[in-house]
């Protein structure tokens, strides 16, 4: 916990992402980008974190100012390629008479997919000036987030609590699959796919529930956990160590979930502020194939052990965004602060 | 650039006042310790002497440096005897001839008694020792020990507390409060808090030009020396152009129980009034409104009311922001505000034809009336286009269906269409009938429902039983009656014709079905 560094940046941070480092080098990531919100002039800025023991942050240089950012949200910045090729797709998301906010962006080079409050899913290509493909009226409610499932499939979540699977190989404007929670229609705000197993997806909703889904199964989520007391803004699987999951929320906390099967160390010996889950229900898939399931979909709850640790020292103003790469975690809050932790135990 | 300079100078002034308030009001040090704190205060706000000293020490020959004596004198004026003595030693080593004089000065400087609170000596003991030392310094002056060394003599005069000498150091002191503290140090080291304002007023009069009136900062500091908290707050409010400093200072003093609470005509007590003013100002800021919420939370009497009024006026450009505002309201159980914000968002969505969004906002606000409105829109679209839009929404309503009757009807009607599509005619028929008999369907829709029943009636096999057919007939009659009495009296003749034909067809179909049903039910299977 002592290795958390806070820096106040005079802008509320809405999105924060590490610049990807190539996996061949063993160096830690040191540059990240932030996007601000709620300012009259919003900015996307690049920051660098030094290499010394306790990182000091230098505001190296600022990226493009005013990137249409009243409509915040820059998703994954695809490293240097996207930064040097500045494209501007104006009014891609729109209402009949007005511009609509674009709520999510995801890249799988060279394709970019965006979703917005107008319920459209739009496909771009980095080198293409125009829009490659639009799925009009993909959703009658706002689409909050999008993620790539496979190279041609994306998964979106909307404010009606549904996950929709879109296949770009198919023509037409219908989703290939719809999954949803039965019961209350709680808006889902974020989604992330397991890095190695493409059928496992985690979502976070307005009520702070963390759900793990198996996309191959129909409808129901695999497990539900009460993670936060307010909206969950982002959920991320750790890219190289997928037994670890990170979530951040409107209630000002950032949780680190660790999925350990057959853990011998009793929880009181593990450091940090631990909060064990209050209610957890796992639904074993009916007639499902258990041999290929990962630890996230483990059926026997006595063997699977889920620990959640608070990553921020105190409850702050809402945490809007986080990113984790290697051992480095960075997050941005409404308290106009950026927190960097370079020694995340993964 | 000028603005920044101005801002910096205001910030420095504010810091000065804040620290003084800390010393006088919160520390509330008694005589003896009070002077130590005031010395710290002055040293903190006159830090340029350290920079100069660094410069001098780092030069090749510190003694020859032009700022050398400047530094020494500043040290003495601030009561930093050790440092002054150390600096002087450099000079002493350069002038062996004057060694005696320098030694004497060194003694005087290092032997000055310093009152340490909580130490073994009492105030009277300290007083005695101090007077002795003071007399020693005087004797040195009269003796002429420093006669040939003008600088040392100057220092000795300062040590003695000679007013004229101190006044002559105007440039080095630069402010009247520095003058005040130095004067106290060398004349009245055990000054009592109650006596402070006499000396303050006197110092100010002596130091400042009689012609120009006191600056706002000066009167604020003077009010502080007089221990008049309310005057300090008042003057600060007037001098500064926003409530930030005053609100926080008052809050701090209130927590230390230093403010007597007398009720104002508005805003309960002074602290709350100022905090409310400050927070209201914050709310008008495009991004700092989130912080203002916390301030309102800490105003017990009027905070909530103010928050309720202000939070509805935050401009909501994106759903992201609206969600955050709603969370703030929900955490404080402000149901009214939740409803109104959701309504605003739902109306916006409706205007942009985002029916799903509108519905999800109504669900969050549990707004049945609006949900009814949205369902009407859906049904209108169905009537005009013949198909449902946004099937993904209607098919997956789930428990949200129960929010409003119209919504339930919409969901069930869609279900009927699905059943029909799956050729589950019997179930569909039952559903259709129940929609009318259970009065879930709105009256103006009954004709449409009955028209939907036509294909079922026309089927080869009998789907509606006799009982059901009687029900349908009754519904048709009721629908007909309602149409006549209904508000839609101004209908075009053409429509009347179509309506009449429809009714005819229905009557025919129903009669035929009734016949078939009676026969079927009456037949005994052999």
Image: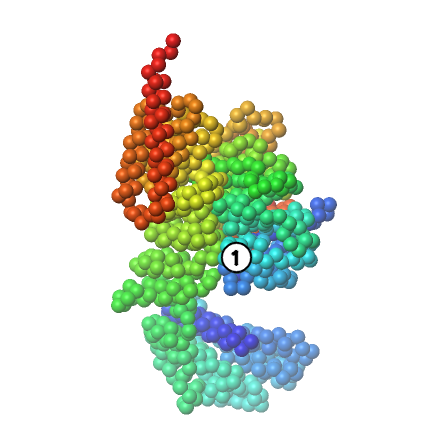
Q: Quadrant of the C terminus of chain B?
A: top left
Out of A9 and A131, give the one closest to the viewer.
Answer: A131
Residue at the image position 63 percent from the left and 61 percent from the top? A63
Mark 1 crowd level (few <14, some 14–19, many ≥20, 10 Å Cα): some
Residue A211 spot, x, y in % from top left? 51, 38
* Vertical comparison of A262 with B45: above or below: above
- Residue bearing mark 1: A99
Image-based side of B463 in relation to B487, left or right: right
> Quadrant of the rendered structure where residue B463 is?
top left
Residue B236 spot, x, y in % from top left? 39, 74
* Vertical comparison of B322 with B224: above or below: above
Note whether residue B210 is visible: yes
Image-based side of B408 in relation to A54, left or right: left
Residue at the image position 33 percent from the left and 41 percent from the top? B444
Out of A246 and B114, give the one closest to the viewer.
Answer: A246
Q: Chain of mark 1?
A: A
């Amino acid at each position: 916990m002592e290795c958390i560094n806070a820096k106040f940046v005079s802008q509320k941070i809405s999105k924060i992402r590490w610049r990807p480092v190539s996996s061949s080098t063993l160096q830690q990531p040191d540059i990240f980008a932030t996007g601000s919100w709620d300012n009259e002039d919003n900015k996307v800025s690049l920051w660098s974190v030094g290499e010394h023991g306790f990182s000091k942050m230098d505001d190296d240089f600022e990226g493009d100012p005013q990137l249409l950012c009243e409509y915040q949200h820059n998703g994954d910045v695809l490293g240097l390629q996207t930064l040097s090729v500045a494209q501007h797709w104006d009014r891609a998301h729109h209402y009949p008479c007005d511009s609509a906010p674009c709520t999510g962006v995801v890249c799988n080079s060279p394709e970019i997919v965006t979703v917005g409050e107008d319920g459209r899913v739009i496909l771009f290509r980095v080198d293409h000036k125009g829009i490659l493909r639009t799925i009009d009226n993909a959703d009658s409610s706002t689409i909050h987030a999008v993620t790539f499932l496979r190279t041609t499939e994306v998964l979106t979540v909307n404010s009606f609590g549904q996950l929709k699977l879109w296949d770009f190989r198919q023509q037409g404007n219908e989703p290939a699959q719809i999954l949803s929670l039965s019961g209350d229609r709680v808006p889902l705000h974020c989604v992330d796919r397991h890095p190695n197993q493409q059928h496992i997806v985690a979502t976070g909703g307005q009520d702070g529930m963390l759900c793990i889904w198996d996309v191959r199964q129909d409808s129901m989520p695999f497990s539900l956990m009460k993670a936060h007391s307010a909206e969950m803004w982002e959920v991320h699987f750790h890219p190289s160590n997928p037994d670890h999951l990170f979530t951040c929320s409107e209630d000002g906390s950032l949780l680190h979930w660790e999925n350990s099967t057959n853990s011998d160390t009793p929880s009181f010996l593990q450091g940090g502020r631990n909060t064990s889950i209050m209610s957890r229900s796992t639904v074993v898939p009916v007639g499902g194939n258990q041999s290929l399931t990962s630890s996230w979909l483990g059926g026997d709850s006595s063997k699977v052990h889920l620990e959640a640790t608070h990553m921020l020292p105190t409850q702050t103003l809402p945490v809007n965004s986080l990113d984790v790469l290697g051992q480095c975690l960075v997050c941005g809050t409404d308290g106009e602060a950026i927190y960097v932790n370079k020694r995340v135990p993964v | 650039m000028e603005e920044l300079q101005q801002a910096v100078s205001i910030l420095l002034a504010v810091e000065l006042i804040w620290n003084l308030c800390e010393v006088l009001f919160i520390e509330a040090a008694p005589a003896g310790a009070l002077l130590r704190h005031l010395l710290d205060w002055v040293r903190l706000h006159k830090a340029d002497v350290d920079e100069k000293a660094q410069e001098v020490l780092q030069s090749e020959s510190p003694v020859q440096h032009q700022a050398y004596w400047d530094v020494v004198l500043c040290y003495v004026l601030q009561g930093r005897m050790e440092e002054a003595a150390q600096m002087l030693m450099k000079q002493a080593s350069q002038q062996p001839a004057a060694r005696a004089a320098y030694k004497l000065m060194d003694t005087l400087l290092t032997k000055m008694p310093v009152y340490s609170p909580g130490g073994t000596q009492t105030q009277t003991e300290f007083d005695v020792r101090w007077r002795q030392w003071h007399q020693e310094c005087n004797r040195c002056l009269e003796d002429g020990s420093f006669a040939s060394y003008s600088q040392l003599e100057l220092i000795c005069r300062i040590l003695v507390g000679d007013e004229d000498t101190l006044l002559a150091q105007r440039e080095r002191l630069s402010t009247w409060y520095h003058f005040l503290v130095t004067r106290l140090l060398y004349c009245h080291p055990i000054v009592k808090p109650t006596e402070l304002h006499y000396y303050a007023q006197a110092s100010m009069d002596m130091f400042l030009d009689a012609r120009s009136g006191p600056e706002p900062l000066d009167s604020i500091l003077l009010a502080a020396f007089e221990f008049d908290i309310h005057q300090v707050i008042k003057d600060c409010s007037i001098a500064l152009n926003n409530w930030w400093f005053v609100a926080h200072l008052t809050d701090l003093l209130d927590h230390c129980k230093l403010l007597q609470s007398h009720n104002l005509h508005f805003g309960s007590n002074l602290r709350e009034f100022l905090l409310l003013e400050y927070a209201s100002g914050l709310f008008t800021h495009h991004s700092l409104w989130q912080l203002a919420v916390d301030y309102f939370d800490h105003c017990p009497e009027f905070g909530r009311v103010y928050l309720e009024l202000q939070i509805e006026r935050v401009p909501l450009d994106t759903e992201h922001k609206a969600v955050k505002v709603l969370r703030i309201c929900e955490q404080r159980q402000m149901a009214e505000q939740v409803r109104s914000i959701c309504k605003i968002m739902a109306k916006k969505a409706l205007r942009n034809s985002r029916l799903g969004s509108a519905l999800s906002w109504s669900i969050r606000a549990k707004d049945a009336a609006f949900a009814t409105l949205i369902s009407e829109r859906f049904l209108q679209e169905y009537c005009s286009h013949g198909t449902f839009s946004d099937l993904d929404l209607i098919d997956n309503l789930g428990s949200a269906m129960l929010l409003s009757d119209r919504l339930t009807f919409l969901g069930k009607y869609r279900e009927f269409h699905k059943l029909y599509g799956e050729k589950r005619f019997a179930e569909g028929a039952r559903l259709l009938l129940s929609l009318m008999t259970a009065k879930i369907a709105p009256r103006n829709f009954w004709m449409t429902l009955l028209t939907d029943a036509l294909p079922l009636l026309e089927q080869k096999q009998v789907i509606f039983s006799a009982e059901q057919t009687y029900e349908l007939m009754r519904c048709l009659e009721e629908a007909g009656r309602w149409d006549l009495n209904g508000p839609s009296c101004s209908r075009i003749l053409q429509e009347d014709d179509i309506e009449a034909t429809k009714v005819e067809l229905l009557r025919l179909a129903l009669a035929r079905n009734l016949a078939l049903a009676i026969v079927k039910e009456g037949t005994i299977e052999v």
